[in-house]
Image (cartoon, rainbow, N blue to C red):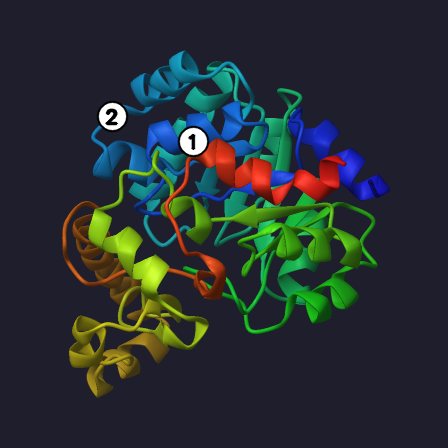
């Protein structure tokens, strides 16, 4: 075990260097609890918890706590285009801290306000990054580690390989977690051998028995190849990794000319992103819980061929690492 893996395990209080990444809309309470119970750490995605699965936030955290007493984390999306949304997110962070959550992953903004709040309670903050410049800003804000999102990830993927990102970011003396393209023991072992402290996985856990995504979504992951993953800007206004389907083909991958123009303007881009966010919240909720053909996934689909329990996925992933 490398030294940064030891630091990651100390930061999270878990047994295995694996994060079940926060996924909108697929992070249901049972999946979060099952991955934590198996020795990894499940991360609460608050919009999934409250909107998709209809829990009042505190009640949802307490329900997860009834399913497992192992450590869990929370994803804090800190983009500030909406003051109302930002205030709600900060209130959710307060509730999570009150309920004993001490590991947070920040995304989409400057994490300094979260770092200050969480560190004051003895907690830990890791920050999502796809580029050196975002890592630098996270370090300046005082984060404890980085979730390094590469070009094989689902959702908002990066543009660079895991190796290139590690080379660029390893100068920072904090744990780096590889996110994207990990589905089996060979992938897991290669990331740790490269020097990463841990891995974050999403797509593989969608194809688990505990995930409440539709059977059609899970089958689409099993049937897809890496070449079926495309980047669409029609979900949030920035590229999102999706499985290519008839619906995606018919919709196209780019916004129309007028939308693209609005996204380039200082005063209208936040309005457009809000519009895309609200629309995608509805579309992705429908995708996860129905037969709708609009599914986020990363290139790890290449090696996913079955639906397994989270415990079995984690056990298989770490068999050589444990040995």
Instruction: Locate residue 34, reporting x and y percent.
Output: 44, 27
**Residue at the image point whose x is 43% and y is 53% from the top:** 203
19 shown above or below 219: above
Instruction: Locate residue 110, reporting x and y percent.
Output: 55, 50
What mark, if any, has residue 198 been given in the picture? none
**Residue at the image point whose x is 74% and y is 28% from the top:** 10
**Residue at the image point whose x is 63% and y is 66% from the top:** 131
Q: Quadrant of the C terminus?
A: top right
Q: Nearer the viewer, residue 65 or 79?
A: 65
112 shown above or below 260: above
Q: Secondary structure at mark 2?
A: loop
Q: Nearer the viewer, residue 179 or 209?
A: 209
In the rendered structure, the answer to whether residue 54 lies left or right of residue 18 reads left
Asked if one can make out residue 161 in the rendered structure from this viewpoint, the answer is yes
Task: Find the residue positioned furthest to the bottom.
Answer: 257
| C-beta proximity under 8 Å, tags 1 and 2 | no
Q: Quadrant of residue 48?
A: top left
Q: Quadrant of residue 275?
A: bottom left
Instruction: Write down the residue under mark 1.
Output: 32
**Residue at the image point whose x is 28% and y is 56% from the top:** 219
Instruction: Write down the residue under mark 2.
Output: 55
Comparing labels 1 and 2, the label whose residue is closer to the camera: 1
Q: Nearer the viewer, residue 242 or 318?
A: 318
Q: Secondary structure at mark 1?
A: helix
186 shown above or below 3: below
Q: Quadrant of the N terminus?
A: top right
Instruction: Report crowding for label 2: few under 14, some 14 to 19, many 20 or more residues within 10 A (C-alpha).
Output: some
């Amino acid at each position: 075990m490398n030294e940064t893996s030891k630091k990651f395990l100390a930061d999270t209080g878990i047994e295995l260097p694996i994060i079940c990444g926060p996924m909108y809309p697929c992070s249901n309470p049972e999946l979060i609890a099952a991955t934590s119970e198996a020795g990894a750490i499940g991360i609460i995605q608050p919009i999934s918890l409250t909107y998709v699965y209809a829990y009042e936030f505190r009640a949802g955290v307490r329900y997860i706590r009834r399913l497992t007493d192992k450590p869990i984390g929370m994803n804090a999306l800190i983009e500030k285009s909406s003051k109302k949304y930002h205030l709600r997110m900060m209130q959710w962070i307060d509730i999570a801290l009150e309920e004993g959550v001490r590991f947070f992953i920040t995304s989409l903004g400057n994490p300094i306000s979260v770092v200050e709040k969480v560190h004051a309670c003895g907690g830990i903050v890791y920050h999502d990054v796809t580029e050196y410049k975002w890592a630098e800003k996270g370090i300046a804000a005082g984060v404890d580690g980085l979730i390094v999102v590469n070009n094989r990830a689902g959702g908002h993927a990066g543009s660079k390989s895991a190796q290139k990102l590690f080379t660029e970011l390893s100068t920072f003396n904090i744990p780096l977690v590889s996110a994207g393209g990990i589905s089996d023991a060979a992938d897991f072992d290669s990331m740790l051998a490269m020097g990463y402290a841990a891995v974050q996985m999403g797509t593989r856990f969608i194809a688990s028995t505990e995930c409440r995504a539709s059977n059609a979504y899970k089958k689409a992951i099993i049937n897809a190849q890496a070449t079926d993953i495309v980047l669409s800007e029609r979900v949030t206004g920035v590229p999102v990794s999706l499985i290519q389907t008839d619906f995606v083909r018919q919709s196209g991958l780019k916004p129309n000319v007028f939308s693209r123009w609005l996204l380039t303007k200082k005063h209208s881009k936040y309005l457009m992103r809000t519009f895309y966010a609200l629309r995608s919240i509805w579309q992705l909720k429908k995708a996860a819980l129905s037969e709708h053909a609009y599914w986020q996934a990363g290139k790890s689909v290449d090696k996913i061929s079955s639906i397994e329990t989270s415990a079995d996925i984690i056990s298989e992933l770490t068999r050589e690492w444990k040995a």
